[in-house]
Image: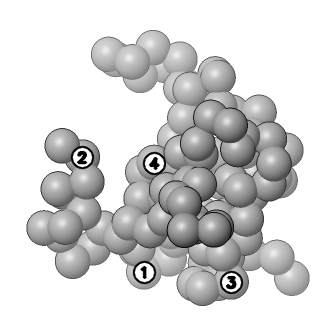
Amino acid sequence: MKYARYLRSEKLHFYGWVANERILGVCGFELHGDKVEIDLLSVAQDKQRQGVGGAMITALQGLYGLPIEAETSDGAVGFYRKRGFETTAFEHPTLGKRHTCVLGIAH
């Protein structure tokens, strides 16, 4: 399972967004010297479009003060664009159309 990679790695981090003792969202990311790279970001279906995903992005910005990068599909690219990420489409050899999403440091 994917979460096992996070448990075994010193570079990969995994956290949950919790409210009222319920996990509403999870974020898996890797810290590089010059950026935070999101590997996964997921929000409980009944809590989507309520600010949980955006709050997790804001938390990463506050914690690390680094640009944030993610790779995503057509279905999720709007989420990143809405939060100010610049996106670039590309063709992945096995996954098809994907998007690189980058959010610089706010000044």
Which label was assigned to residue 65?
Answer: none
Going by the numbered disc 2, the residue's amino acid type is Lys
Which of marks 3 and 4 precedes in the sequence? 4
x, y percentage for residue 56? 64, 64
Which of marks 1 and 4 precedes in the sequence? 1
x, y percentage for residue 39? 42, 51
Which label was assigned to residue 33?
Answer: 1
Residue pointed to by mark 3: 62
> Is residue 29 visible from the viewing direction of this image?
no
Q: CA distance from mark 4 to mark 1?
A: 19 Å
- Number of residues whose C-alpha sits closer than 10 Å to that of mark 1, classed few (under 14), some (14–19) or many (20 or more): few
Which of marks 1 and 3 precedes in the sequence? 1
Going by the numbered disc 4, the residue's amino acid type is Leu
Q: CA distance from mark 3 to mark 2?
A: 25 Å
Viewer-closest of 61 and 21: 21
Residue pointed to by mark 4: 40
x, y percentage for residue 87? 70, 40
Residue that protrudes farthest toward the left in the picture: 8
Q: CA distance from mark 4 to mark 3?
A: 18 Å
Residue pointed to by mark 2: 2
